[in-house]
Image (spheres, rainbow, N blue to C red):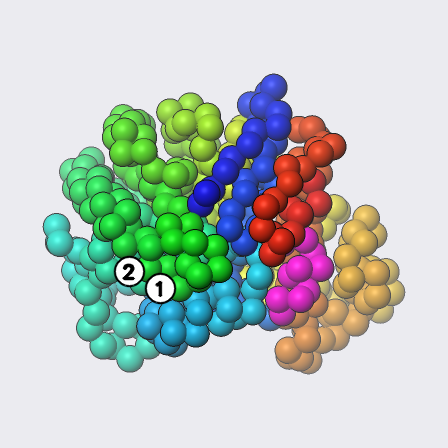
Amino acid sequence: MALAFDILNDKGAGRRAIMTLPHRAVATPVFMPVGTAGTVKAVSQDVLESLGAGIILGNTYHLYLRPGHEPIRRMGGLHRFISWPRAMLTDSGGFQVFSLSQLRKVSDEGVRFRSHLDGSSHFFTPEHSMDVQIALGADIVMAFDECTEYPAGRARAEESLRYTMAWARRSLDHFRAHRHEVPWRDEFGSGSQSLFGIVQGGMYTDLRRECAERLVEMDFDGYAIGGLSVGEPRELTLEMIREVLPLLPRDKPRYVMGVGYPDEIELYAKMGVDMMDCVLPTRAARHALLFTSEGRLNIKNKRYAEDQGPPDPACDCMVCSRYSRAYLRHLTASGEALAATLNSIHNLAYYLGVMRRVRAELERVVEVPVVANASQAAPEAP
């Protein structure tokens, strides 16, 4: 089975579940660290494992450009290439292509764009996105979609929705015809990937409802809400999530893409979102911003120059257990590469800790379903 989603408790709006994938059984709600180019920036895989990350993301656009999906396929897929034995999700590349607003041209067939690396021309269709993601071999892959910018007028949002719906159908048909080509089929069996549809529609609730209802009719393995965190007010983000969630199947994973700050992911999890991802923990870390139980902390601030206390007194991560604020400030001020690593480890520990606390509040799991394949370790701590 490509994906099993066992709900353990959904007495309130939030819910606890175990999502069993070929490479890992994952406790949800879950925050997924983003590994854009085959790495969660500045953090090694063994450290991610020690932090309890059960699933990470890879970026189709970036991996397609460098090193290329075919070399990765020949090396056994992205899991083997980056030495990550746990679960993985790849995005469709749609958001990255969307971000190349001056370098792309959208048509019914797909999107032609120029590489941000060397200016070379490329053409992504739903079928090509599926081929790339099948070659990469993540446990979960995403339908090719067209992300709507903010602000966008009604006509633009309707056009974007038309692309997304047509491309969702084409993604699904191509995926079902070719999923047996996954590079690790000998290990887990062919057809062991899952495909999620993505709800778009800009900031128009009726378009969001239409998109969700039509995607559900197509019967994807799970559903994501995309096109958020593109500059809209937080209240509008919340409104779109609140509008769409009840329309998605209760018995399948629900994923909000590209969010958010710690208080946001906690709120969305308690609303019933099962999966979230964001580059913020590591991006903020590289800019010396730490998330702590005492609020956000800019470690570059001069007042920490002789502060011998831990970055977060309430945190027991490997950084807070060993290093002082003064030392982290020194590393940052000196431009040392270790600063990005230690700051990133702490921020990821904080985010993953928020999700562990939320899962415990929703209901602590006493028993975890037995996973048949020995390579599927028990899920991250509930």
Taking the magenta stretch, the answer to whether it contains residue 48 is: yes
- Amino acid type, residue under disc 1 in the picture: Ala
Q: Is residue 77 above or below residue 279?
A: below
The residue drawn where x is 27% and y is 29% is 217
The residue drawn where x is 58% and y is 23% is 10
Instruction: Please tell me how crowded label 1 is: few (under 14), some (14-19), or many (20+) other residues with Cα within 10 Å.
Output: many
Instruction: Describe the element under mark 1 as helix, strand or loop.
Output: helix
Residue 223 drawn at (x, y percent): 39, 38
Q: Looking at the picture, tell me which residue is in the foreground, 329 or 217.
A: 217
Instruction: Describe the element under mark 2 as helix, strand or loop.
Output: helix
**From which residue to which does the magenta span run?**
44-54
Q: Is residue 339 above or below residue 217?
A: below
* In the image: residue 307, left or right of residue 126: right
Residue farthest right in this picture = 308
Residue 245 drawn at (x, y percent): 43, 28
* In the image: residue 90, left or right of residue 151: right
Q: Quadrant of residue 338?
A: bottom right
Residue position for label 1: 135
